[in-house]
Amino acid sequence: MSSSDNREVLLDLLFERLDLNRTPDSVADLVLAAYAGEAQLRAVLAGEPVELPARPEAGPGSGQVYLDRVTVAGFRGIGPQASLVLQPQPGLTIVAGRNGSGKSSFAEAVEIALTGDSQRWADKHSVFREGWRNLHLSSPCAVEVVAHVDGEQAPIRIRRSWPDEATEPSQGVNEITHRGAKHPSTDALGWRQPLDAYRPFLTANDLGRLISARPSDLFDALAPLLGIEAVTDADARCKKLRKEYDDRSNVVKNERIALRRALTELDDDRARASANILTAARPDLDALDRLLRDHSEGSDPTATACRRIAEAPALPEPADIEAVATALIEADERLTRATASREGAAHRIEELLRLALEHHDQQGDGTCPVCQVGVLDAPWRAAAAAQLEVAQQQAAAAREAHAALDDAWRQARTLRAVDPAFDIPDVLAEHGDRLQGAVEAWQAGGGTSDLVEFANHLRTTYPSLFEVHTAVREHAAAWLHTRDDAWRDHSTALHAWLHSARETRADEDRSTRLKAAVAWFKSAIDDLRAARLAPFATQSQHIWEQLRQESNVELAGMKLDGSSTRRRVAFPATIDGAATAAMAVMSQGELHALGLAVFLPRATADDSPFRFVVIDDPVQSMDPSKVDGLAQVLAELAERRQVVVFTHDNRLPEAIRRLQIDATIWEVTRKEQSEVEIRKNLDPVKRYLSDATALAKTTELPDKIRGPLVLTFCRSAIEAACHERVRRERIQRGERHADVERLLERALTTTQTAALALFGDADQGGKVLPHLDQRKGRWAADAFKACKQGAHGVYGGNLERLVGDTARLTEALR
């Protein structure tokens, strides 16, 4: 099943579960949106229009892939080019050879051709990475895998080659040919996900890593085979988004606690009111908003008093007061001088002369009306006018002295009206006594009318008053500044917190919906995981039962538990009836067998497009009984899979021969200069002929028993050769394996089988003997007839000659 097909199947299952559980639309929409992607999930939560997935229809499946040939040159243990030829069909192939023979190089070649890497090279410091080029023949360096897709005639060729200057396996160049097109990687074939999920290769290192890995690593290795990543990804999206909301909520909560703690340390009614609001786990955000909008001191008397002091008018500068005092003294001295001189009577003389001149102007010349002696005439008038002008000048100076004195007194009276006293709040208490003393001293001399005394009073009391008055105002302003700065910083933080808190408050409904969706996914994933794991667990347990042989550990299933950092694979088991965890009580050999039991169901899953499985060195640490079990497991798998096993342990081929398991066995030997030779050994045809030869030569059995047995083996060899030819020709033409096997099953007799091989039609049995007689010779027809009929009675001919003729015939039929 392809990745897209699997997504559609999963989506259909989600729809069924949503309907079955009568899931509310608000949660169902989130489930479907999360399945579609993160952008769709965020859009649904934001109330934005989004197109949700519709219920799908199932799509077609993908082709089934078999291996046909593996060719290697200049790579790992293989120097000159060598090819491993396989039958692209279900069956068991054993590639045997001692350590260092080069057999595992073929297994690695398949893996690196399909994936571009090798699990044996997972550790970049491994010696395997250093010896990926052959030491004796490093150029050309290339691997090629030819694969067949069931139902297609043209093969897939996957070639990976390395230029001479390449120093890393990753520097290879891929060339993939499929249906006449070339591709740079197997991703173009849609194999990326299946290779990760079903991984059709297994080495001894993989088995060791599989069993010794952390629980989460083993979980990650098995989880993909369930094919529910689309659902677990959707669940992860919901969890991720919910975590975003939770993290944001926790940040807001922690900031609220920190702000409240900081505000309680601030001497400010606004801070106290804000802290009181923030005390609640769910604060009244509107109340806090109103408080932040009001920037006045409110009912804080200290702030009100300090504001009144700071904004009070400043007192005149001491220099100005000194000028007033000086002006008073100078005006007083000037007036005193004017009064003591002729200037003091000048204004009276001025008045008399003015009146006398007016009298003369009105009465004319005559006797002075005052003294009755003097004469008021023209000469007198001229002298009087000149004298009047002098008197007027002297009177003006006296008036200016009076005016200056009046002005000085006016300024002095203004100073007397100044009230420098304040109501001092506690925060300014250290300045209160000084200010009170300065005010009292200032007010004590303010009632005197003596100019000099008042001027001296100004000079002695005002500087101190000015100093303390200014200090009080400055300290009041500083206290307000500090207070306002502190509040301003906290106010800014409160504004920012309020904005975040409103967003978080808006997220509460979304977080609640996400919580419901996460709960829905948890239940769905548990059920999906159990349902999809069940067949794998059953198969794994079945394989373990075959492998464990004499082990007293009984598996009770396999389970994938948990998620995120707590994911693990559980293997419940019993040992002598007592419940335990399998991996805690198993020996190394049992753990190795368990690894196979876990891996093989994954590699042979029905949904995998790969109908082959490549196993390298699976016999390690196994006792003989478990090797027999492994042979039986491989034979069972080979009924529906192409199983290719590489081994250096002769116990596996021996078990296969002893248990009479059908298998093709290749023997790999390595000569000088890394030249690798592959020889076929003990395929079904040769095995039957070998057994027939041995029986034909034996003298321990009577002829009436020996003859039918030899003929039966010869007939089986002929049928096996025909089966091989039918499978090879038809499968290479693109016919499906299942269709070919049905044809072979319907060919019930040896003649029908031969007709199917020679003519492609089992009903053409009458043509078999004439065809053999004409094309191969009389000996071929006689041998075929003898094998077909002689098994039911005593054969009178030479058995050894018949076996030889049968061998010639099988080669011809092949």
Image (tube, rainbow, N blue to C red):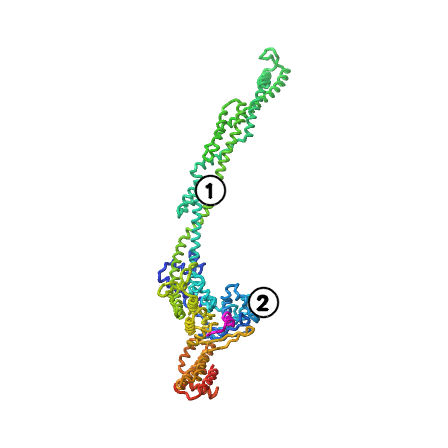
Residue 38 position within the rendered picture, expressed as x and y whole percent measured from the top left = 45, 59
**Circle 1 sits in a helix, a strand or a loop, which is it?**
helix
Residue 277 position within the rendered picture, expressed as x and y whole percent measured from the top left = 41, 44
Q: Amino acid at mark 1?
A: Trp
Span highlighted in magenta in the image: 93-109
572, above or below 101, in the image:
above
Separation of marks 1 and 2 at Cα, in angstroms:
71 Å
Q: Residue at x 49, y 37 (%)?
A: 477
Q: Residue at x 50, y 37 (%)?
A: 478
Out of 753 and 496, give the one closest to the viewer: 753
Check residue 487 in the rendering and tell me which mark sits there, or answer none: 1
- For disc 2, the neighbor class at 10 Å (few under 14, some 14 to 19, many from 20) is few
Residue 760 visible in the current orientation: no
Q: Could you tell me if the residues under marks 1 and 2 are in contact, i.e. CB atoms within 8 Å?
A: no
**Circle 2 sits in a helix, a strand or a loop, which is it?**
loop
Residue 84 position within the rendered picture, expressed as x and y whole percent measured from the top left = 50, 74
Placement of the N terminus among the 4 image quadrants: bottom left
Query: Which residue is identified by label 2?
Result: 165
Out of 218 and 7, give the one closest to the viewer: 218
Q: Amino acid at mark 2?
A: Glu
- The image quadrant of residue 224 is bottom left
